[in-house]
Image (tube, rainbow, N blue to C red):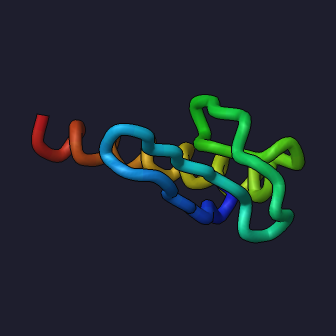
Amino acid sequence: MCEINQKATGNAKRFSLSLTCSKTGKPINKTNEWGMFCEDMCDLENCKKGVGQLKDLITGFNKLFG
């Protein structure tokens, strides 16, 4: 997942939030099951690996305590 920079502007009546990738400076404009990304899909393979490891961990807990 891209490392996200947040920039908030405005006030309570007119609020704006800008999300950009800290690696590329491009706007965050893609979201999927692995996270939020800019058009370059930074670190997508690492995210896929992490989701797989998390699923394995949850499966292990279910076997242990389920």
Task: Looking at the picture, tell me which residue is in the foreground, 42 or 17.
Answer: 17
In the displayed structure image, the side of residue 19 where residue 57 appears, left or right = left
In the rendered image, residue 12, in percent from the top left (x then y), is placed at 31, 45
Q: Residue 43, relative to residue 29: is it above or below?
A: below
Pick the quarter of the image with the N terminus: bottom right
Asked which quadrant contains residue 5, the reply is bottom right
Residue for point 23% across, 39% down: 63
Asked which quadrant contains residue 24, the reply is bottom right
Residue for point 61% across, 50% down: 18
Pick the quarter of the image with the C terminus: top left
Residue for point 53% across, 48% down: 17
In the displayed structure image, the side of residue 42 where residue 19 appears, left or right = left
In the displayed structure image, the side of residue 28 where residue 18 appears, left or right = left
Residue for point 57% across, 54% down: 50
Q: Residue 47, relative to residue 31: is it above or below?
A: below
Q: Residue 40, relative to residue 8: is it above or below?
A: above
In the rendered image, residue 49, in percent from the top left (x then y), is placed at 64, 52
The outermost residue toward the bottom is: 23
Task: Looking at the picture, tell me which residue is in the foreground, 11 or 55.
Answer: 11
In the rendered image, residue 37, in percent from the top left (x then y), is placed at 71, 45
In the rendered image, residue 15, in percent from the top left (x then y), is placed at 44, 44
Please give the count of numbered marks on the rendered protein: 0
